Amino acid sequence: MKLKNHVRSGPHATSDQALAALILLTIFWSMPSCLADKDLTESITEISVPAADRCDCCLNDYGFDQENSSIWIKSNWMNHDPIYLNVWSSDPWHNRIKDGNLLLNLDDYPCRNNKSQCQNRDIASGEYSTICDHHRYGNYSSRILAGKGEGVVTGMFLLGGSAGSQDEIDVEVFGKKAVEPGTWEVQTNYYVKGSQGNCSEPYGIPEPCHVSVIPIDFDPTESYHIYNISWIGEGENCSAIKWYIDSKLRRQVWLDAKGYVQSEVFDENGEIIEVGNAYKGSLPSNQSKIFLSLWAAQNWSLAGEFNYSKKEPIFAKFDWIKYLSPDVI
């Protein structure tokens, strides 16, 4: 609006122009300093904001204090691969918030009374995934207490694309007993266009199997630990993936200057304990959802043989999750 419409006309010693200038000066000096320094012709919408405010998918220090259906979906599906014993149910018993944690529960309810409610499976479990499906590159981390038991797997993973042609990056924490005194295991792996490589045990030796098993010196079912995936790239080109446990680099894969994928696994002290054979290939680059999951395996010796003889619920707990895109790291 025009300022002169708000200046009374009349035979004053001060001209209309001088009075207008005085009012403008008063407005200027009353403005916050952050705006006073800006050109008054610049639109307010052009004021810069922190990069984090422009990140639609970011989960910065996301704690599970309450249900949030604008961010998370409770899974309701079944994987037909025979390695999976359970169905994932969206009911509030298998997925719930309690004491500031996301609690995923694996048991035989309601399957034991009516298997048709579990798509004819004997076991049901919980799984969360983000509504946002365009996560790509950045740091993903979560503080997790893994589910306990032979054949029990607690997972944090990224998945983009349709089944069979998906890109995927996984952390899978085994709930089994120590493989030897003081040593438990976590599996890391990735898929590119549905392929996990030409794998046979022991995984990761040699590549191009995309799997490596990391020895850890703690029982992941007895205390919380922080698991991190650092996904590095730009556009359609992923250049590296790094997996950390409690802030220690435990595995990295990267694309070298000649287009070969390299792989290294480290112990708790940062010493290299495994080197994969380089292979010509690529790394995951599809925009993805984040999944937090608990499941039961069968016929998979690495995870152990699942046995639900105690008929007691098995829980995995997620204290918090973070995702920061590259422009806010």
Image (cartoon, grey):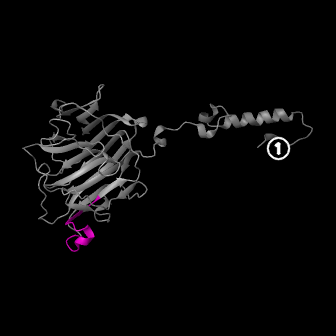
Q: Secondary structure at mark 1?
A: helix
Which residue is most to the left? 181
In the image, taking residue 262 as reference, residue 132 lies left or right, namely right
Name the residue that disc number 1 marks.
5
Query: Which residue is rendered at x = 25% and y = 62% of the image?
Result: 87
Report the number of numbered marks. Answer: 1
Q: Position of residue 184 (x, y in %)?
A: 13, 45
Q: Residue furthest right?
A: 11
Query: Residue 44: horizontal and vertical position, in percent?
Result: 62, 39
Residue at image position (22%, 58%) is: 315
Above-or-below relation of 78 to 234: below
| Residue 54 place in picture, x, y as percent | 49, 42
Indicate the quadrant where residue 272 lies: top left
Q: Residue furthest top?
A: 257
The N terminus appears in which quarter of the rendering? top right
Q: Residue at x 12, y 60 (%)?
A: 307
The boundaries of the magenta stretch are: 110-126
User: In the drawing, does residue 181 fall left or right of residue 20?
Assistant: left
Give the x, y percent position of residue 135.
Answer: 39, 44
Residue 24, compared with residue 66, is above or below; it is: above
Q: Callout 1: 10 Å neighbours few (<14), some, many (20+)?
A: few
Residue extending furthest bottom? 113
Hey, what amino acid is under mark 1? Answer: Asn
